[in-house]
């Protein structure tokens, strides 16, 4: 429906798509629920998960970052080992595979040539394949054995936002349904937790002014920026840095908190912005230790923490959600900060230079 892809009152598709995330969450919960209110997935897909001894996630760009979080979900909830690979690397530099791999392709567009090259190759080798995509009937969907849809609605802005959180939600559901089929105990109710996520997303989307302010304070004059986090926060930092690079052209990198001091700390100067994510209790103190290390060298810190783990010096506190699912909301400050940074710099938010929404060449 063409009216679905109008900008309406929004100045940019990206802002509209960021705002749609709570709706997309609710749509996903609804679509993946059966009449009894339980989450459900095509049993053939669940059998493919259960018959495999390892999942290989293949993706590019933002979808690769979703894959990294997906590994945490599938290993943490379904206890199935997962490897995550960049499509363009995997095709030439294949790792030693296990006996019964299942390949999961994550792709918003379903058209990424790098991912398709892997799909063609592993199909020739006789392996099982599943595509998680936003576009029904797309190439990766048609050519894989199975498909799971994101139901995020068309994503127009080149920089992906709602597709990323939709990918995370679908991966969490896949992990949960697989775990239950194996009688693995899941100590939380995912439907309930995703509902909490949708509400928390709304709170964040209503805090735009604050993110505009943070963006102005930390990113208006800088040439570079670093994002640091530990564990799953690190993966969200990779995505945060990519968002900022893509649309504001500020040179940005995401680092594992403890790794910064092994080289990159040399780049810290007076005023270098460091955006730190602290949503995980087990590493809350250590990531704050890393912030102190860079502040001692002049960095300008912006700490985004989760309620319950927050401290006085934090710039923004996100609502409390299940610890495993924090990437679904901690990415929203990253998206909004990048959006406003691009806006403040007069960049073309929806159509950044040199980038295409789907890259159909290898
Ligand atoms: C392009 C886009 C990125 C996207 C990547 C993967 O490079 O500019 O935003 O993350 O492709 O796209 P896919 O459709 O496979 O998720």
Image (cartoon, helix red, strand yellow):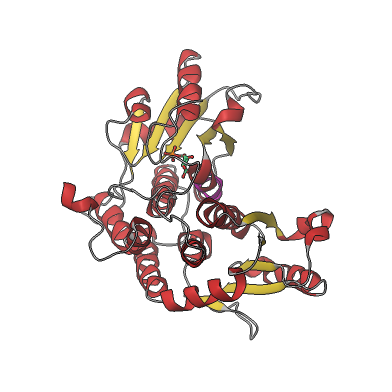
**Residue at screen point 51% across, 24% down:** 118
Q: Tell me the magenta residue range.
A: 66-72
The answer to if 69 sits in the magenta stretch is: yes
Check residue 282 for magenta coloring. no
Q: Is residue 234 above or below residue 99?
A: below
Give x and y (percent) for residue 324.
52, 60
Residue at the extreme bottom: 312
Q: Write the residue at 37% across / 38% down.
A: 109
> In the rendered view, would you say 92 is above or below 289?
above
Give the left or right position of residue 39, taking residue 252 as reference: left
Give percent across and percent down for residue 201: 39, 68
- Image height of 262 relative to 112, above or below: below
- Can the viewer see residue 300 in this picture? yes
Q: For the view shown, which residue lies furthest in the top direction?
A: 124
Q: Nearer the viewer, residue 219 or 228?
A: 219
Give 360 or 281, whichever is nearer the viewer: 360
């Amino acid at each position: 429906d063409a009216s679905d892809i109008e900008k309406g009152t929004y100045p940019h598709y990206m802002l509209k798509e960021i705002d749609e995330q709570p709706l997309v969450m609710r749509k996903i919960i609804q679509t993946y629920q059966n009449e009894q209110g339980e989450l459900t997935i095509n049993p053939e897909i669940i059998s493919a998960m259960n018959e495999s001894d390892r999942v290989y996630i293949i993706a590019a760009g933002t979808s690769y970052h979703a894959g990294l979080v997906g590994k945490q979900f599938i290993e943490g909830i379904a206890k199935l080992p997962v490897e995550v690979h960049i499509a363009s690397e995997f095709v030439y530099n294949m790792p030693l595979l296990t006996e019964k791999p299942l390949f999961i392709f994550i792709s918003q567009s379903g058209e990424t040539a790098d991912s398709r090259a892997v799909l063609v190759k592993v199909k020739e080798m006789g392996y099982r394949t599943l595509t998680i995509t936003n576009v029904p009937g797309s190439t990766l969907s048609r050519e894989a054995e199975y498909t799971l849809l994101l139901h995020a609605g068309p994503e127009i802005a080149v920089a992906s936002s709602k597709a990323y959180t939709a990918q995370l939600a679908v991966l969490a559901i896949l992990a949960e349904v697989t775990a239950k089929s194996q009688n693995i105990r899941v100590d939380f109710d995912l439907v309930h937790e995703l509902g909490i996520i949708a509400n928390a997303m709304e709170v964040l989307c209503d805090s735009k002014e604050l993110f505009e302010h943070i963006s102005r304070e930390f990113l208006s004059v800088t040439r570079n920026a670093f994002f640091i986090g530990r564990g799953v926060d690190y993966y969200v930092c990779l995505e945060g840095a990519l968002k900022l690079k893509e649309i504001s052209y500020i040179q940005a990198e995401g680092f594992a908190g403890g790794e910064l001091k092994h080289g990159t700390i040399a780049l810290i100067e007076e005023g270098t912005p460091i955006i730190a994510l602290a949503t995980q209790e087990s590493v809350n103190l250590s990531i704050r230790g890393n912030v102190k290390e860079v502040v001692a060298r002049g960095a300008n810190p912006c700490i985004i923490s989760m309620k319950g783990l927050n401290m006085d010096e934090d710039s923004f506190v996100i609502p409390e959600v299940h610890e495993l699912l924090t990437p679904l909301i901690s990415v929203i400050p990253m998206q909004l900060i990048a959006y406003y940074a691009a806006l403040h710099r007069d960049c073309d938010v929806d159509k950044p230079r040199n980038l295409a929404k789907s890259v159909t060449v290898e």
